[in-house]
Amino acid sequence: MSKNNIPDMLLAKSKRGDIVVSLQRHLLETEQTSKEIFCLDKRWGRSWCRFFKLSTKNQQEKFLLNLRVAALFHDMGKANEEFYLAVSSPNRFAQTLRHEHISALLLHLPAIKQWISANPMLDFDVICAAVLSHHIKAARDGDKWRWCQPKHSKILRLYLQHPEVKFILEEIAKVANLSTPVPNLPINSWSKQPPWEQAYLQGIASADKLKRSITNDLDRCNLLLAVKAGLIVADSASSGLVRENHKITDWINDVVHTKSIAETDIDNAILTPRILQIEKNKNKPFKYQSFQEKAATLGPRALLLAACGAGKTLAAWKWAEAQTKDSQQEIGKVIFLYPTKGTATEGFRDYVSWAPETEASLVHSSSRYELEAIMKNPNEEELNKNLKDFRLSEAEQRLFALGLWSRRYFSATVDQFLSFIEHGYTSLCLLPVLADAAVIIDEVHSFDRRMFDNLVNFLKRFDVPVLCMTATLSPARQKELLDIGLRLYPNEGERLEFTDLADKEQHPRYNHETLANQEKALEKAVSAYKTGKRVLWVVNTIARCQQIAKQLEDKLKQEVLIYHSRYKLKDRQTIHASTVKAFQQQKDPVIAVTTQVCEMSLDLDADVLITEIAPVSSLVQRFGRANRHLARGQDFRAQLYSYLPESHLPYSKEEIQTALKFIQALGSTNISQALMATKLEEFSLTEPKADETARFLSGGYFATPGNLRDIDDFTFTSILNDDLDELDRKLKEKRPYDELLISVPKKYADKDGKSNSRPDWLPKYLAIAPSSHYCPRFGFMEKEEK
């Protein structure tokens, strides 16, 4: 310590081993990182500017200059007594103010604001917004992250006269070409007194004014978003690289400024190995369908609509291959996004895993465990890929994202890459990867309303090649996507041209019969199984799924397959594999009872499909699990049965009534997927258009995390009480523990330790659930397992 107990060196981070990072060093390195990652003469810089629609040279230069200044200023608020004590001593305590809140407050001191505003290329409010929101913990109002609302103390000692602070201000003057003298900062501590209270009130007024401005000025809004996200990226990269003892320039040159994907790379890494596998499995030469080949001509934005089992995924990879040949832009990544962890894992297994291990990644919240399971049962050339857990601290999220920057081919959940639009921190750290990519988004029919709104916002506001695809989509949602520039593929004329696709879609696959109730369905299921059929029964709730499975076992005197979402991951993985394998063969009878999970996560091919009435789009997906591959020949018809469930929940009465009309319109014999698609359009419900309330788009000065999807208020991620000891061991050994987690109804989830003694080491996001309600075959049940 120097005189007056002011430290000789200000700290930006806690000491880690021999690594000590001063505040001055961190701010300089963050500015260096921003300049080198987003270099306007290299691909990532060009991609970033294209992504945010900064099309002119002036806009691009303005972006980089504002980002560099924000990077130099973003942690200036760490020059205070409490922060220094927090990172230099082992004791942890709540600080009076968050450091980024102080940084933004400093900017609003009149002398600093006047100084920064002297350069017309600097947008003062954009810089303030980026600085204040770079940890996604800044709100205008509320109790949690309200800007500059103290947690405890009414006074906070600042170190604004420190030489490191003055040095950084001089550096800002050089970078921004500010000829006026560097202003003097106040010597007094922070308190709700002048000049601090006036600076805060000025900041609130400026924040409100900016919010109104970006509503009407899209160019300024794009600049704001690019700088806010760019600062998060630069800060995460500089912090992570120093933590791992990397040299910033060398690492960026090795990982960021790599070659783009060449014309032949996707064919060599993905398509050829996958085709060889298909030929081996089918024992005959592979030939692309005409609609798959023509997908290469679609351009950068399209909506691919084709029936279940038509071969959309190969078409999508042909589209991605074509994006690498676009002379207008280079891409360095291909990102395949799925709505669920199960579908992302299957996409990785079937396609992405063929790429070299240094280029491929599976990215979702339990991907580390899924990859370890794949390694235990490898499919030929599948290798060890990126292993990482997502329930991480902010520092670990940074490292996780940086670890993925070098990969080329991704199979991921939508959440991991698109949740940036709701201020998802990891997703924001991955944003340069997304901006550098061709993006395929599968199963868009399954998106809930909030998720679809966010998809539309993403497509409207950001410029990146995107192919959306699904087997079914309501006319209202089709129109929304087409209205924002996606090309429908195949259109009516192309469907006539693609005879191979038309034959598949128009071929009669099903006969249908309406049943009076669940009891009649039980009779049909037992009869079909006894005559050697592969039977799939789909219901709308987990409780009925479990109940029907037990009834079938009583009737058949043997175990049946049961599959839903309420299993521990390790059990669900086993059941998933067993169910898929059972339906791949045609010799032996099979019977499985599932919930909605079968609509996407399972590649099943049933002879008989029984279902409760559900929304029209769900019914079409369920029916697509029967006679999926025409494996029993052209003359075979799968038998479909449907009946009304005892309750319309979890769907609305209107959805069920509309579905009944859809079923009636299908008729009873020779039903094709083309007919179902036509009737889907006829019997789809109207929906409101997407709103533009995504937090990243409308946050202005502020940033707090939101949700990409509609929130599930009915379940809680939990650990069974019998698994607590095993979880404790895994945590101590720093091993993944996803296999132990389970989603249970909230009434069974003890989050506060009311009925169990909650261990101090248990992660806060986990509740404890009673093991007495769990069975590895039936999952978590409402009643205790005897």
Image (tube, rainbow, N blue to C red):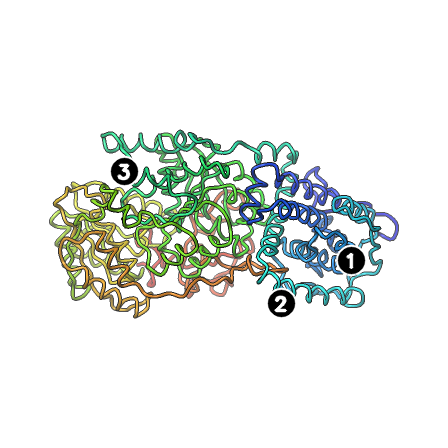
Dot 3 corresponds to which residue?
289
Crowding near pointer 3: few (<14 within 10 Å), some, many (20+)? some
- Secondary structure at numbered mark 2: loop
| Residue type (three-letter) at the residue carrying disc 2 | Asp
Tell whether 544 sits left or right of 704. Answer: left
Task: Say which quarter of the image contains residue 151.
Answer: bottom right
- Secondary structure at numbered mark 1: helix
Q: Considering depth in this image, is 17 or 666 the residue closer to the camera?
A: 666
Image spot of residue 480 (x, y percent): 40, 58
| Residue type (three-letter) at the residue carrying disc 3 | Gln
Tell whether 262 sits left or right of 673. Answer: right
Tell whether 554 sits left or right of 62. Answer: left
Task: Tell me, yes or no, if residue 579 can be seen here.
Answer: no
* For the residues bearing labels 2 and 3, Cβ distance under 8 angstroms: no
Crowding near pointer 1: few (<14 within 10 Å), some, many (20+)? some
Marks 2/3: CA–CA distance: 58 Å
Dot 1 corresponds to which residue?
114
Dot 2 corresponds to which residue?
143
Q: Considering depth in this image, is 321 or 529 the residue closer to the camera?
A: 321
Q: Considering depth in this image, is 66 or 540 the residue closer to the camera?
A: 66
Which of disc 1 and disc 2 is earlier in sequence?
1
Q: Residue at x 29, y 35 (%)?
A: 288
Crowding near pointer 2: few (<14 within 10 Å), some, many (20+)? few
Which of disc 3 and disc 1 is earlier in sequence?
1
